[in-house]
Image (cartoon, rainbow, N blue to C red):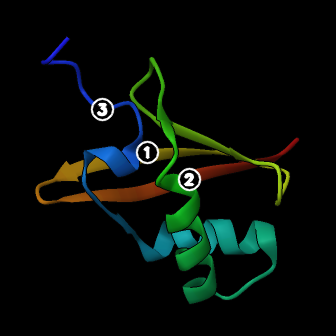
Amino acid sequence: MANEAPQTLGARGQVYVTLTAATTYGDARHMHSEEARRELTKLLLAAKLQSDGSYRARSRTTRLDISARVIDESPLLVVVAVNVRSY
């Protein structure tokens, strides 16, 4: 179990949300890109790794289900795209 990868995105390292991902999230939340980037970064720190390699976070506050495509560009974990759905 010592070789097991951390389950949450935040546990894996420094998360960087691209403008494209922030804009997608901002469109769903009706907010500007920089505000969306900050909020999305906080939400994705707790995102869990899925079997398809994406990360998923759900927020009761926003009532959104977020799937994120992440590329490991050491030392950064770059969120290149998100899919945002209401639940």
**Residue picked out by circle 3:** 6
Residue name at image x 49 percent, y 34 percent:
48
Is residue 60 shown above or below 36? above
Residue name at image x 39 percent, y 45 percent:
9
- N-term mark: 2 or 1: 1
Q: Quadrant of the C terminus?
A: top right
Residue name at image x 20 percent, y 11 percent:
1
Q: Nearer the viewer, residue 15 or 21?
A: 15
| Foreground disc of the pair 1, 3 | 3
Q: Is residue 42 left or right of residue 65?
A: left
* Numbered disc 3: secondary structure: loop
**Residue picked out by circle 2:** 82
At label 3, which amino acid type do we have? Pro
At label 2, which amino acid type do we have? Val
- N-term mark: 3 or 2: 3
Which label sits on residue 69?
1
Q: Is residue 68 left or right of residue 77?
A: right
* Numbered disc 1: secondary structure: strand
Q: Residues within 10 Å of mark 2 (few under 14, many from 20)?
A: many
Which label sits on residue 86?
none
Label 1 near label 2: C-beta < 8 Å? yes
Name the spot of residue 74 as percent of width and height, x first: 11, 55
At label 1, which amino acid type do we have? Arg
- Residue 7 position by quadrant: top left
Q: Nearer the viewer, residue 3 or 33?
A: 3
Q: Nearer the viewer, residue 72 or 48?
A: 48
The CA span between labels 3 and 2 is 21 Å
